[in-house]
């Protein structure tokens, strides 16, 4: 790998990966993979369902405060759903275990980091085999 990868605080060189204050030496890295973490559905749904129940109870008992609080909880549940992002995480596998190196909402960026690390690992293996011969 002639040109090291250096973008958004992530550096990949011939010897190491540096990201978010963590440094992984390439000789310790076994593999890298990207994991996509989707939106959390449970919390927004629970908030919204609680809001619906409070709003119904407020309407049934004629309590305007409960009706308004229930409507607000439904809105908060909807906002909790729409403001969540799908995140992509680069997981580095070492002998000590798997660790998250990079987390971003930009899938292309995480894929570029993964490709740079895999290229660096391949170059390091090729150099090691060449030295053994």
Image (cartoon, rainbow, N blue to C red):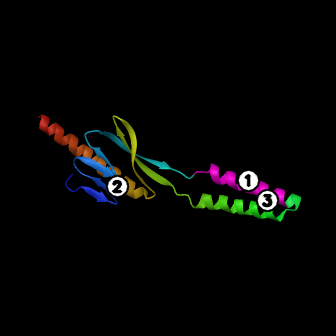
Q: Position of residue 39 (x, y in %)?
A: 56, 53
Give the quarter of the image for residue 9. bottom left
Bin the neighbour count of mark 3 within 10 Å (Cα to Cα): few under 14, some 14-19, many 20 and up. Answer: many
> Tag 2, which secondary structure?
helix
Name the main secondary structure of what is drawn in magenta: helix
Residues in magenta? 40-58
Most foreground residue, 44 or 106: 44
User: Residue 112's mark?
Assistant: 2
Q: Residue at x 17, y 37 (%)?
A: 129
Q: Residue at x 82, y 57 (%)?
A: 56
> Tag 1, which secondary structure?
helix
Give the quarter of the image for residue 79. bottom right
Q: Between marks 3 and 2, how big is the CA–CA gap?
A: 48 Å
Q: Between marks 1 and 2, how big is the CA–CA gap?
A: 42 Å
Task: Decide which of tag 1 and tag 2 comes sooner along the chain.
Answer: 1
Q: Is residue 47 magenta?
A: yes
Q: Is residue 118 left or right of residue 73?
A: left
User: Residue 50's mark?
Assistant: 1
Name the residue beneath numbered marker 3. Answer: 55
Q: Is residue 50 magenta?
A: yes
Q: Please say if the residues under marks 3 and 1 sit with CB atoms less than 8 Å apart.
A: no
Q: Between marks 3 and 1, how big is the CA–CA gap?
A: 9 Å
Q: Is residue 26 above or below residue 106?
A: above
Q: Position of residue 4 (x, y in %)?
A: 24, 55
> Tag 3, which secondary structure?
helix
């Amino acid at each position: 790998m002639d040109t090291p990868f250096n973008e958004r605080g992530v550096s990949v060189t011939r010897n190491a990966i540096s990201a978010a204050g963590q440094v992984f030496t390439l000789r310790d890295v076994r593999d890298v993979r990207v994991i996509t973490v989707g939106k959390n559905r449970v919390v927004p749904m629970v908030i919204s369902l609680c809001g619906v129940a409070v709003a119904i109870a407020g309407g049934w008992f004629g309590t305007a405060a409960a009706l308004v609080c229930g409507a607000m909880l439904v809105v908060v549940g909807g906002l909790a759903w729409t403001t969540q992002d799908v995140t992509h995480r680069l997981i580095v596998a070492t002998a000590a275990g798997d660790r998250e190196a990079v987390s971003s909402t930009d899938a292309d960026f995480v894929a570029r980091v993964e490709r740079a690390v895999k290229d660096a690992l391949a170059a390091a293996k090729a150099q090691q085999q060449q030295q053994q011969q």
